[in-house]
Amino acid sequence: MPAWRLWGIVALAPFVWMACSGSDGDDDETPAAARGGTATGSGGGDGGETTAAGDAGAAATTNARGGTTSARGGSTTGGATSTGGSTSTGGSNRGGSTSRGGNVGTGGSASAGTGGNQLSCLSAGTYCTRSNASDCCSGACDGDSCCGFLGDLCPNGFGCCSGSCIEGICQCPPGTLDCGNGCVDIEYDPSHCGDCDTQCGTSSLCESSECVCDPNLFDAQFYVMCADGCFNTHSDAEHCGDCTTACAGGTACAGSVCECPSEMLDCGNGCEDIVANSEHCGSCENACDASTEDCVNRQCQCKAGLFLCSGVCVDRQTDSMNCGTCGNACKGGKTCQSGVCGN
């Protein structure tokens, strides 16, 4: 063959190869959109998606949301199939990479995931000022440190609003109890003596978690501890001699015994006045004649205008047996008028 013809065949070889390579082979791999195909790209709000499709029907989809990459129907030339990316919590790459660096959203960092930064409140004992008291876990700042309520953590060993920091927790120290409004001293608090419910009564104190009678009271030796407090059983009419005996009928407690007050006697229905009582004059049995006598200084005396004649109170102005004087009797049917016997 002539040399000029051989040279022409060699020069045309590249054009023939290019024409053949773009034909209808279904198994060919294409790095970009092939002849007759389209290439589209769209960005999603969470990192976007990119889709490439060619005549061979291959499609590759990259999804930034959730951080996973999948390949469907084909493969890309020179690329590796992505089987995973960064997760919504900060994630890790497994064989592939996510778009935009694998960050959640549009390249930002996660605020609540394991791959982001978490904001926490200030625990008890942490330095604070009143202006940022809301940053304290308890919401309370005593001026220089956050204080915690009962049950709150206090890792710094102090800063409890109530109680004390014991083993890293705000709690009531020994000898105290939480009675609803913070820790109270059950050893010496008369309103919570020994426990939250026991309240010491009248004239009593709380000593070593027990209610006792106040030793500083006058006549303290006569005071006895009763259910409702301490009382002087020597003179208290409601607790006479013991905690349950109450004096009745006007009697008073004297020497731990219920008895009538001075100038009075118990005549069966309670204490009676024997000084000026006509029914019990000087004693329970002595009764004055109510029509003619009054009781004066424990004795029956004639009423005003009457005189005692032979043990009987009479009106000597009209009494015919004692007319004018005791023993002067009117005779002959005469009557006593103005102390004189007359017709």
Image (cartoon, helix red, strand yellow):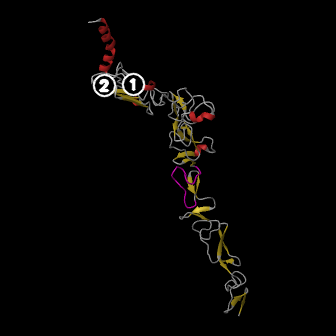
Residue 276 point in image, percent of width and height = 65, 68
> x, y percentage for residue 64?
41, 29
User: With respect to residue 83, does 133 lie above or below?
Assistant: below
The residue identified by callout 2 is 74
Residue drawn 59% across and 35% down? 133
Q: CA distance from mark 2 to mark 1?
A: 20 Å
Whether residue 141 appears in this view of the structure is no
| Magenta part, dominant SS | loop
Pointer 1: residues within 10 angstroms few (<14), some, or many (20+)?
many
Q: Is residue 195 above or below residue 96?
A: below
Q: Check disc 2 and give the amino acid type.
A: Gly
- Look at the image and tell me in which quarter the C terminus lies: bottom right
* Residue 120 position in % (x across, y down): 52, 30
Q: Which mark is residue 85?
A: 1
Give the extent of the magenta segment. Answer: 234-250
- Tag 1: residue type? Gly
Q: Quadrant of residue 165?
A: top right
Number of on-image labels = 2
Query: From the viewer's perspective, is 291 left or right of 170?
Result: right
Label located before the other in sequence (2 or 1): 2
Label 1's element? loop
Label 2 crowding class (10 Å Cα cut-off): few <14, some 14-19, many 20+? some
Instruction: Write the residue at 61% across / 58% down.
Output: 261
Q: Residue at x 56, y 38 (%)?
A: 188
Which quadrant: the N terminus? top left
Q: Nearer the viewer, mark 2 or mark 1?
A: 2
Q: Tag 2, which secondary structure?
A: loop
Of all residues shown, which one is farthest toward the bottom?
Answer: 343
- Which mark identifies residue 130? none
